């Protein structure tokens, strides 16, 4: 059906890297969209997660949102929002869809992270006279960092996956090569694009996992592997 | 909604296909995960774990299009999607399975062995029951993810509820897209509840404990 | 594995929906395919119902995707019958084809089809790629044909992602008309993007009801960039002569106006292809 040689040839052909639909631009689009989404989702989800983890109020909501969000198909959400807001606003609609997809795992990570801090430590910080902000900065964040990074990791993978589908609503991103490759039966393009997507996802996953491991180690000062 | 009323049979047919396309991978993937988590030699555990983490990171559409080249299936037909989803389930269940069994308290195993139970009896009467809560939890996550991920199979021609998204967007019929969302969500939640109930049924001792508190 | 799943689904569907079983015919069911295009699916459904009505058992494999995916399936015998478009299919098998008129294209297609596939009766219903602009844009730039675009700069062309590589896409525009365009892969958002002004020119299928509904101007094509393209059933050798006659009758009965009307029913009345197909067949007296 196809050969490694063709794949390699396609990947090393500079024509496939230049232009609006060249791999370089698509890669940057994909990465930019992902990072912006994660930042915005984090801005919303982390404060809420910390608040709920600390006060215990709204716990059931967090758990419900977490479970429910896994059952929502990302492709459907994206299409629905684009249709709702109109094609002219599709960039905004897709961004909204992506942020909605990223919030639940980040929220869950922040919540679980704070919740897992022993109550004595949290109370201890308050007893020492730390302001809420100081409590978060010196106790909450450091101790829950690993869990939060874990939440970001899940969100990162979900968002990267969904951006792959963006060409279906007329946007860019690395999925373009997959969609066009499927239509043209250009296997080199298809597999080449899929490969770059795979590399982007695995790279992100490895980086975030390593960050998580490092944070765990710092916490426990142990040299055991996770 | 009018659209649903006019197209009810059609949606029902798609739903059935969707349920099948989700259930088969759940079963195959769980079995595969179990075999690998329990029966693989210790030295491979790390490699298998890393490989599965990597696979799980890959977007489903990328796997759907890359798999045919690796194993020779065709795009057409559900085989490709079922295999890909099974691998996803296996990846996700591998970690839950491994952790569920490692959480079984050592004293319980020790006592059981001291009582003279054979390894098989040990597994069936002690390990498995104690691991069930963790296994069910992992299965619930896998089920919800699989049901929603299966919809992406529509892009490679599988005739499931994901088709409602593609066709609804092409013809600009919002109700069609909404129907797909609701149907998939309902199927996912139903499976979740069913698994939760199964977990409760299989672990009667937890119920008794809860009552006492 | 695939067959088991399929037959189990079929059995469960029949049991649960309480449908009367389809009349059993001799041998394997005929596999009818369609593109991931609602209009094409309606025609495929028409073929399916006509055959089922005559006692054949039919397996629907709809939304298979692009030509590049399903033609190999047709050649391999995995699909037996497919509603196609003469011009586009001719270009697929013979990229250097020079025929442009309707009859010419049909005869060229018959010659170009590989062994094992036959083009049945040509339909009067045409549905082909066409470049469209909004009426405002046409008036502002004095456009009636694609050639008039030569005077306009910075044209953004929108269409499906694969248009970038098609012979009638940007490369064809440049070589046949000397027109340079910037391509935007708008996919299913093409018409809306055109109306919203995000693109200047859109590739819209000629039978799309929105061309008339939105008052879009289809630019004429004097250089024959687009081959004339009409609906035509493509059948493999597995389709017997009785089935071929039935399908050919359906094909001749469908006019261009019919096709647009079917599309309107799908998009405006939002009916499923099976309902639309049934109604049309009944109205033409093609089913009992």
Image (cartoon, grey):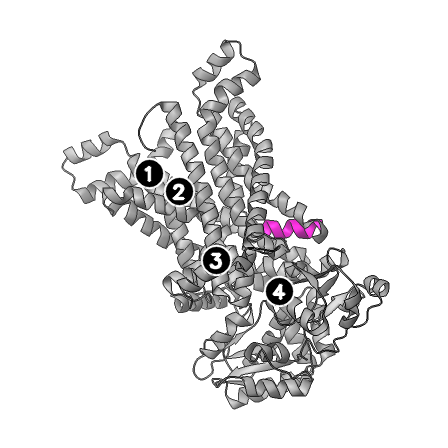
Give the labeled residue for mark 1: B100
Q: Are marks 2 and 1 in contact (CB under 8 Å)?
A: yes
Which mark is drawn over residue B138? 2
Give the labeled residue for mark 3: A11
Of the pair B23 and C71, the residue shown nearer to us = C71
**Element type at mark 1:** helix
N-terminal label among 2 and 1? 1
Subunit under mark 3: A
Mark 4 Cα within 10 Å, few/some/many (few <14, many 20+)? Answer: many
Position above or below: A60 against A37: above
Q: Quadrant of residue B24?
A: bottom left
Real-space Cα separation, disc 3 to disc 2, in angstroms: 38 Å
| Dot 2 and dot 1 within a common chain | yes
Name the mark nearer the viewer: 1 or 4: 4
**Element type at mark 3:** helix
Q: Quadrant of the N terminus of chain A?
A: bottom left
Q: Residue at the location (32% across, 32% down)?
A: A225
Extent of the magenta region: A76-86
């Amino acid at each position: 059906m196809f050969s490694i040689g063709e794949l390699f040839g396609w990947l090393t052909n500079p024509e496939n890297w230049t232009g609006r639909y060249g791999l370089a631009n698509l890669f940057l689009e994909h990465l930019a969209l992902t990072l912006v989404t994660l930042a915005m989702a984090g801005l919303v989800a982390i404060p809420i997660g910390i608040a709920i983890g600390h006060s215990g109020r709204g716990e059931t909501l967090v758990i419900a949102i977490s479970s429910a969000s896994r059952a929502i198909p990302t492709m459907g959400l994206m299409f629905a929002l684009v249709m709702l807001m109109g094609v002219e606003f599709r960039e905004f609609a897709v961004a909204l869809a992506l942020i909605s997809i990223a919030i639940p795992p980040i929220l869950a990570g922040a919540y679980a992270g704070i919740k897992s801090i022993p109550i004595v430590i949290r109370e201890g910080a308050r007893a020492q006279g730390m302001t809420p902000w100081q409590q978060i900065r010196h106790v909450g964040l450091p101790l829950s960092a690993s869990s939060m990074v874990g939440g970001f990791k899940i969100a990162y993978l979900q968002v990267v996956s969904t951006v792959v589908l963006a060409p279906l609503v007329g946007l860019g991103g690395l999925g373009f090569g997959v969609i066009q490759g499927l239509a043209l039966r250009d296997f080199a393009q298809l597999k080449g694009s899929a490969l770059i997507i795979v590399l982007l996802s695995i790279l992100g996953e490895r980086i975030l996992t390593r960050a998580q491991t490092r944070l765990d180690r710092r916490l426990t000062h142990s040299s055991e592997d996770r | 909604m009018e659209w649903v009323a006019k197209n009810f049979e059609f949606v029902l047919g798609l739903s059935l296909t969707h349920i099948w396309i989700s259930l088969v991978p759940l079963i195959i993937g769980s079995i595969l995960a179990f075999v690998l988590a329990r029966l693989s030699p210790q030295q491979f555990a790390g490699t298998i774990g890393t490989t599965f983490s990597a696979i799980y990171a890959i977007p489903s559409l990328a796997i759907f299009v890359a798999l045919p080249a690796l194993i020779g299936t065709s795009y057409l037909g559900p085989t490709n999607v079922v295999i890909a989803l099974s691998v996803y389930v296996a990846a996700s269940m591998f970690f839950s399975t491994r952790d569920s069994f490692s959480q079984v308290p050592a004293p319980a195993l020790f006592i059981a062995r001291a009582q003279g139970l054979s390894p098989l009896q040990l597994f069936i009467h002690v390990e498995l029951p104690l691991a069930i809560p963790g296994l069910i939890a992992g299965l619930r996550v896998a089920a919800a993810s699989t049901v929603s991920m299966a919809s992406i199979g529509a892009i490679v021609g599988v005739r499931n509820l994901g088709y409602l998204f593609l066709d609804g967007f092409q013809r600009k019929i919002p109700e069609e897209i909404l129907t797909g969302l609701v149907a998939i969500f309902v199927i996912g939640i139903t499976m979740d509840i069913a698994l939760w109930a199964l977990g409760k049924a299989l672990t009667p001792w937890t119920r008794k404990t809860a009552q006492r508190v | 594995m695939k067959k088991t799943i399929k037959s189990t689904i079929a059995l469960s569907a029949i049991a649960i929906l309480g449908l009367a079983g389809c009349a059993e015919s001799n041998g394997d069911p005929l596999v009818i395919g369609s593109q991931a295009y609602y209009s094409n699916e309606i025609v495929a459904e028409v073929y399916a119902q006509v055959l089922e009505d005559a006692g054949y058992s039919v397996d629907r494999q709809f939304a298979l995707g692009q030509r590049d995916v399903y033609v190999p399936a047709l050649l391999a015998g995995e699909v037996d019958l497919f509603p196609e478009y003469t011009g586009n299919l001719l270009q697929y098998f013979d990229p250097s084809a020079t025929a442009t008129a309707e009859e010419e294209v049909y005869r060229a297609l018959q010659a170009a089809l590989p062994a094992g596939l036959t083009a049945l009766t040509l339909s009067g219903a045409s549905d082909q790629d066409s470049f469209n602009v909004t009426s405002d844009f046409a008036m502002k730039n004095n456009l009636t044909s694609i050639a008039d675009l030569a005077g306009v700069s910075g044209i953004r062309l929108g269409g499906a992602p694969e248009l970038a590589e098609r012979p009638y896409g940007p490369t064809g525009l440049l070589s046949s008309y000397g027109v340079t365009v910037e391509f935007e892969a708008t996919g299913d958002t093409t018409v809306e993007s055109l109306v919203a002004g995000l693109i200047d020119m859109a590739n819209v299928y000629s039978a799309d009801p929105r061309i008339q509904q939105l008052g879009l101007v289809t630019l004429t094509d004097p250089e024959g960039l687009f081959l004339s393209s009409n609906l035509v059933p493509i059948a493999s050798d597995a389709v017997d002569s009785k089935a071929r006659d039935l399908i050919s009758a359906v094909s001749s009965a469908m006019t261009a106006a019919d096709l647009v009307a079917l599309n309107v029913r799908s998009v405006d009345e939002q009916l499923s292809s099976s309902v639309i197909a049934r109604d049309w067949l009944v109205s033409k007296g093609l089913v009992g």
